[in-house]
Image (cartoon, rainbow, N blue to C red):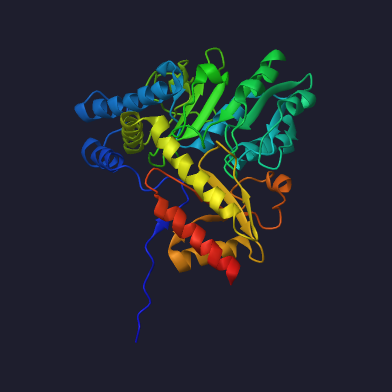
Amino acid sequence: MAVARTPPRRYLDNAATTWPKPPEVHAAWEDAARETGAAAGRAAYRAAAEAGAIRQRARLAAARLLGVDAGRVALPAGGTLALNVALHGLVRHGDHVIATAADHNATLRPLHWLERRGVIGLTVVPCDGLGRVDPAAVGAAWRPATRLVACTHASNVTGAVQDVAALAAVAHDRGGLLVLDAAQTLGQRSVDARSSDADVICAPAHKWLLGPTGAAILWAREGVEPEPLVQGGTGTASESLDMPAAFTERLEAGTGDVPALAGLAAAVAWLEDRGLDQVGGRCRGLAHDCAARLRDLSGVRVFAAEEGAPIVSFTVAGHDPAEAAAILEQAAGIEVRSGFHCAARIHEHLGTQAGGTVRASFGPFNTEADVEALVATVAAITAA
């Protein structure tokens, strides 16, 4: 009797979280968890001092990536928390905010929450069929009460990269701010805070930065001062009930995840050693090849921006995205995401509001063999 063989695992969901991580990241995380075992900034004994040094290494690594002063880099516990800190911390009652249909729910849901409670007015401007936003649409949506524009740097559905400088110019010309969600760019392409003209940049550690979950980056330009979303202990000025005035301490209440910060610092070092643009360029090359080959298949619609993040979304005629994704795993061990990808508004502009898309996203440890397996299996689905 023949025994069914389990196909090898082919992970193509890097836009959700990159995997595998570099071995150096796992080693740094485990060493901090097993050997340091202390809270950063809470005491003067050796292990606590080392925990503080780990946190500072992560802060300096993030600052190098963005080309900024480390004193303006906070390290929240995740990208969603970072965006919530920025959005809740910068708006005031009666403000108006502009977001985009390409945005992730990490941006749209906090803004919707604030709108539903009467704190802000909200306008979500449209995107085109690949997720690109016209800066003129942002200008047209501007009101006297508009406080800021929030946008994703690259769509997590199509990979489309926004013209951040143009969007920032619209906001700045009218006295507003730009909050940038760099979850799908930081780590796989250069994101220089000075040249982007963003006022706030947020990104999680666990996506293209190749770090673990439990850490994120929040940078804000000098003079842009979010009120703390969370209040509590910081290890400094403990005799006072007021939050510390310093940017990092004000936004880092509670005990940070030291092993996650150790992993983040190691991940940035790994990217720097190999060249961020080279690593990201290879990922984008795999995605470009995949998109081109899928476009040649009858019945397959592809949603992937040229020169975008290494993301390829597609649909297969006659198959719900969830069904197609299940077949890919069962037949070839290919792990992709299906559905709406936590992006509530973009699908009405892609024409995929019925069930979303299948999404493949390529990381540093994927190969051409993964592209070949995906394309061949989709071809088999279309031929069935």
Q: Nearer the viewer, residue 40 or 155?
A: 155
Position in image of residue 57 (x %, y %): 32, 25
Figure disc tally: 0
Residue 90: x and y, percent?
61, 23
Image quarter in which the C terminus is found: bottom right
**From this viewpoint, is residue 293 visible?**
yes
- Viewed as shown, does residue 370 lie left or right of 359? left
Q: Nearer the viewer, residue 334 or 220?
A: 334
Q: Give left or right: position of 33 versus 109.
A: left
Compared with residue 373, is residue 209 higher up or lower down, i.e. above or below? above
Q: Residue at x 69, y 48 (%)?
A: 347
Where residue 340 appears, as percent x and y from the top left, is: 62, 51
Identity of the residue furthest to the front in this view: 296
What's the residue at 66%, 17% (across, down)?
Answer: 169
Q: Position of residue 105 (x, y in %)?
A: 61, 42
Q: In this view of the protein, which residue sits in the foreground, 316 or 171?
A: 316
| Placement of 292 over or under 176, stated as above or below | below
The quadrant holding residue 212 is: top left
Residue drawn 50% across the image and 36% down it: 79
- Asked whether the viewer can see residue 226, the reply is no
Query: In the rendered view, would you say 137 is above or below 374?
Result: above
Quadrant containing the N terminus is bottom left
| Image quarter of residue 85 | top right
In the drawing, does residue 192 fall left or right of residue 118?
Answer: left
